[in-house]
Amino acid sequence: MMKKNPQVHCFLLLLFCYVPLIGQNLAVTNKIKPAFEDYFGQPRVSLFLHLNKSAYVKGEHIWFKAYLFNRVKGIPLQESVNVYVGLYDATGKQLVKHLFLSQEGYAQGQIKIDSTMGHGQHYIKATTSWMRNFDENDAYVQQFVVLDENVPPSPVSDKWDVDIQFLPEGGHWVNNVQGVLGIKAIDDKGKSLANLGGVIRNQKGAAIANFKTNRFGLSKVTMTPRQGENYTAFVDIGPEEQKKIPLPLAEKLGLALAIQRIQNNRVMLLVGTNAETKKQIEGKPLSIIIHRDGLLKSLDVVFPEDELYVSHILDTDQLHPVMNIVTLLDNLGNPIAERLFFNDRGFQKTRLNASVGRIAEDSILIRVSGFGKNQISHASVSVLPKETKAYNHNDNILSTHLLKPYLSGFVENAHYYFEASDQERMADLDLLLLTQGWSKYNWDNIFNKPPAKIFDPRVGIDVFGSINSKVPKSTDLLVYAGPNTEPTVVYLNEESTEFRLKNMVLETGDELRMTLLEKRGDLSRPNLFVRTDTGESEDKVFDLEPFNIVESLARAGGIEYNDLENFIFPDNTIKLSEVVVSEKPKIKESTTPYVQEFKLKTVTPETEGLYPRLLDLIRSNGFNVWEMPNTGYDRIRISTKRPSAFGSMAQPAPILYVDDVRYSDFNILLDFPTTRIERYYIDHSGIMEAGGGGGVIRVYTRKDGEVGAPSLRKTKPKSTFFTHLVKKGFTPIKQYYTPSYRSMSDESFRQFGTIHWVPEMKINENGVGTLSIPNTGLTEIMLCLEGMDTNGILYSEKKVVMVSTNP
């Protein structure tokens, strides 16, 4: 019997304000509500890292952007918080850990792939101290692979074992009750097995249901198990090879929970039982609660007389947006069955469009449209060759924030479900949730183990110190954190010789300088012991993914042994030409094969006096220089004064190298004094280098620091100061630079190289973003974008962009 348009009794815990309603199971009011208030009273945060790639070669950096999401409010986390990002080996052992600062929901940084990371599978993990308060693991974990030219790839085996599981919807398969069995087929490595066909037969051999797994090894059948009947699945796992799998026995007593989508944006919640069970529960109220992150609604479940099924039909706008956890409760508030359901009402996959705006000899301007108008949007973009095999992340920002926080198991290719909002993907997502079972939240913990606020949301670094000498009366301690900060005053007294400075933003390599300020204004050097605390601790990755990303790369076409030899020139490498012994004078090459030593000009005191800044020196050598500080990403623009060989109105920009590192823009030249330079080379023609139509500028800095420009980092502190070098602080954020690849046109670069990385794309009030990337000569490139705006709208897009040779 179908109950149409039932009266829905619900209550909503939004910010944990409760409005009591009449006619509910009292256990919901007396047990569930207080438990939810205790358990979900502290906000839950999801964290996503957008990595510029998933496969790296030694010498490259992992560049990333962090997005922190308040799941209850559905917006970026507004509070500042420390983000701890670690790298781990294939067993989950920590290799390194770095500290970054998130502000208004965003952080960015980089970690270098160094010699401690061997060839093969690795993990990156990001977390906050606040997350340690909760039993559920909300840390972000993602696989990546390090490719070593000296180690061949892992062999790929074509042999595998089959594991097929039959999972009843809601967790129960009950005698004489129609129910749905989810089917999950994986191999011995946890990889899904697609297109496996099978049939379920009763003990007489009669076919009851047929099934075939989808691309993720999932399927389902609807059937009514009969008491005393044994069922067997016959699955075709290979040519003329079949596997027999006995199905689980149906329960004699119990209730089954099912959820079905029906037309016109409606959902039916169905509870079924058999006659024996109904006799036992007669007169005892049952409830269905629909919840997520402390948001809670409830429905009464009352079986009509002479009926074994009860249903509620709800409009999808009566459910929570996106994820819903639907739990069936008995009269005492104990959970009986549970099912996850994704409500796509209100979820709209935003489509972004990318186009080429301007092409120059050395750069390409790309426009990305489709962001919300009059919204503050943040987006990061990885720019890769179209043929790349180096971008194969399991998650995107949508699956990380909307799906993974509620599932206890691993989800293969989680990004797939949110790459579009079509009916096929939503059906596949519903099948995934059916086979995932109960949610990540443990009901014993909800009732008995509310999270304790042990760990504060750390912001900054704490500095602890003790003065190991007598402190004169009316003396204070002045603390300078870094070369450009105002002093912090620590008020002392004769009885207290210990102090603590909380939430200081100190980078690794910064100097803490401290001095005693006496009553008369005299300064004296204190005798101090100082230590810093970042709040981090060594940990492991326990939830290892069930398949190896190295093997996935090998299956995608193999990794040739010699492909990556000398793929990247190491930083500061001196590449020497072959030397032939002869009586003629030899021309010695310096740090680059493009510049011979006699062509390098040395900076003299006269040069420093005439041209205090590098920009002055470049301008004096015949280039146009525009300085536009605080106006966006391109704060410095430089172009040649030579007319373009192709008759274009736009004059090309030169290529810039600093210590043989190529930079994609000129922002590094802002406040770059000439005193930092030892030698330089300026070539107006650029004919010796591809894309150098605007010229080439190469600068080599002094190894012993600046001359004539004292710095607190470089000079020895005065004797009145105690100096403490910060060895563990926030990792300094570097400006992205493209590695010195052996070639930007060969197959290795197209498969594993990086064109550009933009952690913060400039987006205007019309919802149009722009980014300038190097022109590598490739005709097709791929943009991999992730983003979020102030309203919590999430963006994820992969776009192939055609680059025409004609502007």
Image (tube, grey):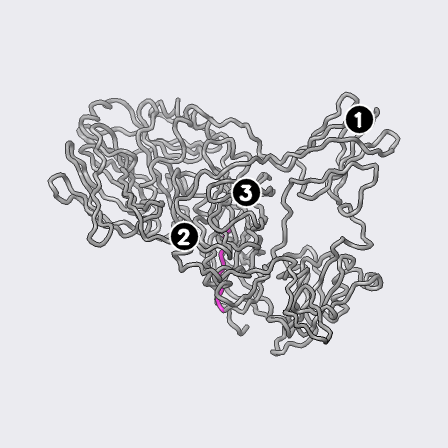
Type of amino acid under label 1: Ser
Measured Cα–Cα span from mark 2 to mark 1: 61 Å
Q: Which residues are magenta?
A: 779-787
Indicate whether 47 appears above or below 649. above
Question: In front: mark 3 or mark 1?
Answer: 3
In this orientation, which residue lies closer to the viewer: 391 or 348?
Answer: 391
Q: Earlier in the sequence, mark 2 or mark 1?
A: 1
Q: Residue 7 location, x and y as percent?
A: 31, 33
**Which residue is at a point 18% across and 43% down the rendered structure image?**
200
Residue at horizontal 46%, vertical 41%?
A: 91
Q: Which of 714/376 is in front?
A: 714
Q: Earlier in the sequence, mark 3 or mark 1?
A: 3
* Residue that mark 1 sits on: 469
* Residue position marked by numbered label 2 in the rendering: 551
Residue 323 part of the magenta-drawn span: no
Q: In the rendered image, is residue 261 in sight?
A: no
Amino acid carrying label 2: it is Glu
Quadrant where the N terminus is found in the figure? top left
Badge 3 vs badge 2, beta-carbon distance below 8 Å: no
- Around disc 3, counting alpha carbons within 10 Å, would you say few (fewer than 14), some (14 to 19), or many (20 or more)? some
Q: Is residue 496 above or below residue 221?
A: above
- From the top left corner, tell me how far across and down residue 347 is, in percent: 41, 47
Could you tell me residue 454's position as x and y percent?
55, 27
**Residue behind mark 3:** 95
Label 3, secondary structure: give it: strand
Q: Residue at x 55, y 37 (%)?
A: 128
